[in-house]
Amino acid sequence: MIGKGASKGAPFLVVIMPYRMRDNLSYCVVNGHAIFLDAEADRYFCLPEHIERSFIAYATACDRSDPILQTLAAHNILTPEQDTDRDSAQRHVSHPLRSAREMWDERSHCTPLMVLEVAAIVCACRWQIGALSFKTVLDRTTRYRALRCLPQPQPDGLANETQILQLTSLFRRARMYIPIANCCLLDSLALSRFLARRHFRANIVFGVTYDPFSAHCWVQSGDIALNETVGNAMAHTIIKVM
């Protein structure tokens, strides 16, 4: 913003600090209400009504004036960003259109060795959830997937999809023999790691509902929900993708 100096009449430049969403914070808007997931603090939260109005004005680009930015920064929603080229937006994934549960024969046979492998992965993921912070668990999953799913020539889309569906079916079949209660986070982490061991990348998608509030997650490859039905995934608004 250009202004005029008070003493000498010379123009001066007022620079408004650019802001971005702070690290480890993601959000979605459900029925006009903003819901946040703070991965570092391992919590979901909403804002007071007057702050929520300011955030929605910012998020929809209706009002990004300095008072709005300062208010959101004061509530630890935004943080100053020196590098305006930085893209803090999360990976975009749309709701699934298909479900692996409806696309592959559940009678797939798995070997005892497969059951042992899946059991080891599930136990390791359960230990991480119980012993480590939510952020650390997500970071470890992301690093493991990055190491295993290195850039490499991929088979054609149909063959790739078929292999993922087959592996997902084998995982579900082996999971039935493991006496640990099913949990969306546990099983999504385990399935993601199981696929990454075979160099297949799949996203873990987190979703929420507002009234009543509930949180859920599932594994998704392209437009296919691998461990969830389409209907249940569609009932949740996506808040984070990793």
Image (spheres, rainbow, N blue to C red):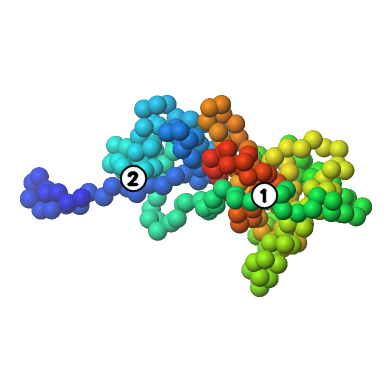
For label 1, the residue is: 99
Between label 2 and label 1, give the one nearer the viewer: 1
Give the percent coordinates (x, y) of residue 109: 87, 54
**Residue at position x 56%, y 26% from top?**
212
**Labels in figure, total:** 2
Q: Earlier in the sequence, mark 2 or mark 1?
A: 2
Residue drawn at the location 48% of the way across and 30% of the way down? 46
> Is residue 8 found left or right of 236 in the rendered image?
left
- Residue at point 31%, 42% (across, down): 62
| Residue 162 position within the rendered picture, expressed as x and y whole percent measured from the top left | 72, 62
Above or below 182: residue 156: below
Q: Which label belongs to residue 61?
A: 2
Q: CA distance from mark 2 to mark 1?
A: 35 Å
Quadrant in which residue 113 is drawn:
bottom right
* Residue found 36% across the figure and 43% down from its top: 60
Pinpoint residue 91: horizontal percent, then vertical percent. Answer: 53, 53
Q: Name the image quarter holding residue 200.
A: bottom right
Identity, as a three-letter code, of the amino acid under mark 1: Ser
> What amino acid type should be assigned to the residue bearing mark 2?
Ala
Q: Is residue 26 visible?
A: yes
Label 2 close to label 1 by CB (< 8 Å): no
Quick one: SS at disc 1? strand
Q: Between residues 139 and 44, which one lies in front from this camera angle?
A: 44
